[in-house]
Image (cartoon, grey):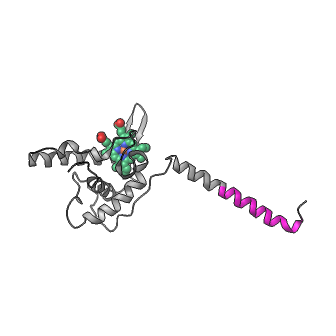
Amino acid sequence: MIPKSEWRSVTTWVAAVAVAGLSLVSILAMAHGDVVPQSVDTHTLPQLGPQWLDTNPYSTGPAHDEALRIGKSAYNQNCARCHGLEAISGGISPDLRKLDNDCTDMADRAKKEACYAEIQEYFLSTVRRGRARDGRVYMPPFEGILTQEAMWSIKTYLETRRESR
Ligand code: HEC
């Protein structure tokens, strides 16, 4: 029998265990990849305005390093659970290090630049809209969750993860 004076500490203890149990459940859920997409703070980057660009404005130039820093963390928060840590895919989703492989090997400079530009457009539209087929969502849309600045930052990070360059 528990004396009445000790009831309070017992109930507190029970509550603490319950809370710990709940956070364990949410940690397990995260480990299984069931995470909510994270918005990303991009205010330290040059702002791009409401128009969607076709090519990555941070690929070169003074904003590159900051975009890389933000893009790496944004990638880890939003993409890595499917596309793999450091963009090394476990095989379920495409390996994004290979995204512009075909361009990288092109000898003709103009053709190569055109190829990179095409992939950049493809990248942005994929990230904005996600991927669904036959009513199944393979990749969620990120428009409304990630800003354009965040999407191009992730592209900037992926450009440093290319297999060949
Ligand atoms: C829930 C898992 C999931 C998440 C999260 C996810 N993707 Fe994907 N992504 C996929 C799958 C699966 C495909 C292939 C879809 C298909 O087969 O049509 C794909 C395709 C792509 C492609 C096209 C690749 C190609 O070779 O054609 C790009 C680019 C891409 N994802 C980028 C991203 C980025 C950037 C993020 C983070 C902002 C992200 N994805 C988050 C699962 C995911």
- The one nearer the camera, 57 or 106, is 106
Instruction: Please state the quadrant of the image where ligand 1 appears.
Output: top left
The picture quadrant where one finds residue 43 is bottom left
Residue appearing at x 67%, y 58% in the figure: 19
Is residue 4 on the magenta stretch?
yes
The residue at 22%/48% (across/down) is 164
**Residue 110 percent location from the top left of the image:** 9, 48
Which is nearer the eye, 12 or 103? 103
Q: Which residue is outermost to the top? A: 134
Residue 88, percent from left and from top: 35, 47
For this view, does 78 lie left or right of residue 54? right
Count of residue discs: 0
Above/below status of 104 relative to 160: above
Q: Which secondary structure dominates the residues rendered in magenta?
A: helix
> Residue most toward the front?
164
Quadrant containing the N terminus is bottom right
Q: Would residue 92 be seen by someone viewing this image from the given angle? A: yes
Residue 93 x %, y %: 38, 40
**Residue 129 appears in the figure:** no
Say above or below: 155 vs 5: above
Q: Quadrant of residue 67?
A: bottom left
Counting from the top left corner in percent of width and height, residue 60 is at 20, 61
Q: For this view, does 30 lie left or right of residue 42?
A: right
Asked if residue 105 lies in the magenta stretch, the reply is: no
Q: Which residues are magenta?
A: 3-20
Answer left or right for 111 relative to 150.
left
Residue 92 appears left or right of 67: right
Q: Quadrant of residue 139?
A: top left
